[in-house]
Image: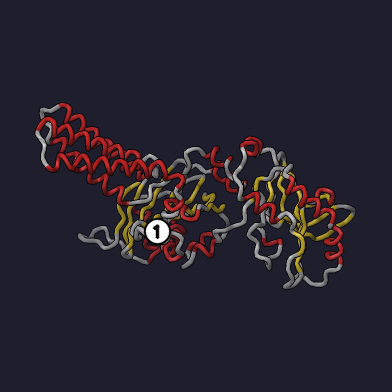
Amino acid sequence: MKPKSNSDLILMLLMAVASIFFVASAAGDLPRLILSSVILVASLVSMVAFFAASRWSRLLSGCVFLLTASFMVYTGLTRGWNVSRILGPVCCVLAAAGYLRKGESTEDDNDEDRGMISIVGLVSELPFLDESVLSRHIENAWDVSLDPTSDDPQDFVVGEAPLFVVRARDCMFMVHYFDRPYFDDPQEVSASMRDLRVGHVVEQHTGWFSVDLMSAEDDADATDPANYAMIGKLFAEIVDDHCLALLFPAFQSCIPWEAGFEQSLRTDNPLSALNVDYLPVVRVDASDPRMLAAVEEARSRFDEFVSAFESRTSDEESYAVKAPIEAGDNTEVIWITVQGIENGVIYGELANDPVDLGRLKLGDRVKSRVDDLNDWMYTRGDEEPVGGFTVKVLSEIYAEPVPEADEENAEGGPSDHDTRNRDPDDSPDGDR
């Protein structure tokens, strides 16, 4: 969970500076020296937690204010009271209460989650990045000139891993760079996800980097596409072939990396070009009565599909079935563009990229028995699609939390390539 407000960082910096003066004024007073030293250390740790996107940042900040209040109370008791020594502890306690309350509610606060204007890359290996390399990326991405020899540079890069601060075109950015998983417990997070493909990426990634916009107003809309144009262009310069997925904190969305995403990031509206609402692959309980009923209807009406397929007259017509495909110990229920039906066997090509079916990929030739059919769908010209009996069920399942039983057996059960966000005019072979 990432702290969202840069005011937190500024306050902790001020507290660190104040604590230095506390230490300097504590000569000969051991309790004051200990308290002021602890405040200094806690302030510095809180700033590190902020940069590390730790969920403990706000809690640490609250503790800093409580310690400062204790310092002021002790000073008042030993050196006499004045207005600042009376009001100071009260203000610090109120500030601490605010920070601690925010820290407790952060995980459930959707408004807070939607405040990060950022693109995060989950990677199997971090691209090399230092101040000079990042400077070249910025110059290429934004067509600006960074002059490190200038006495008063308008645009600049400062810092080193894990944090760089960037100013360009009157905007401030942070670039995070961490050689560790983005999530505290990737296995637990993966098990809680309905989307099998994203869960697979969460388990695989070993590091992450991000480009965050800092200078937006506090009430800025984090979902406004205009905020992502510069972020996307710089991200595209940094990213390499080891990227596994893009994560958008403001949308609570994670998209597995695909060929062509680098070009999409360079557009003026990367959110639209990337299709943030991509189609997921859903964990499905094979015994779910809703799914069983949908599959039974698809099988009982399969003759309608066969009749339509055999009477097709145009290449613009699209015919697809959804059926289980196996590779090793893994099974995925996946869409197949139909090319032929003969002797109870359906022949075609994969219409989706599998999650984990060995070397199989989009467009590879596969076959499946009619008896194993899960769903079917066809379209003719501008007519509404016919079939897709499991689509509505999958949409319902995707919106539900993963039960504990599903989490325990997730690896052993089949996955289903969801079409919940399909445009009615899209053909089945457009699924992802």
Q: In percent of the image, x 46 and y 46: which residue is there?
A: 108
Q: Which residue is mark 1?
A: 137
Quadrant in which the C terminus appears: bottom right
Could you say where residue 389 lies in the image, as x and y percent from the top left?
Answer: 75, 56
Q: Which residue extends farthest right? A: 343
Name above or below for residue 162 compared with residue 364.
Answer: above
Could you say where residue 337 lies in the image, as x and y percent from the top left?
Answer: 75, 59
How many numbered circles are shown? 1
Is 4 on the left or on the right of 150, as rendered? right
Q: Is residue 432 visible?
A: no
Is 356 on the left or on the right of 129, as rendered? right
Could you say where residue 29 lies in the image, as x and y percent from the top left?
Answer: 12, 28
Q: In percent of the image, x 31 and y 55: which residue is there?
A: 157
Q: Which one is nearer the viewer's eye here, 207 or 309? A: 309
Mark 1 Cα shell of 10 Å, populated few (<14), some (14-19), many (≥20): some
Q: Which one is nearer the viewer's eye here, 366 or 42? A: 42
- Tell me the SS state at disc 1: helix
Is 316 on the left or on the right of 58, as rendered? right
Q: In percent of the image, x 51 and y 60: which residue is there?
A: 262
Coloring basis for residues: secondary structure
Q: Which one is nearer the viewer's eye here, 425 or 176? A: 425
Quadrant in which the N terminus appears: top left
Q: In percent of the image, x 10 and y 40: which residue is there?
A: 82
Q: Is residue 290 visible?
A: yes
Could you say where residue 41 lies in the image, as x and y percent from the top left?
Answer: 26, 35
Q: Quadrant of residue 99?
A: top left
Name above or below for residue 382 compared with residue 11.
Answer: below
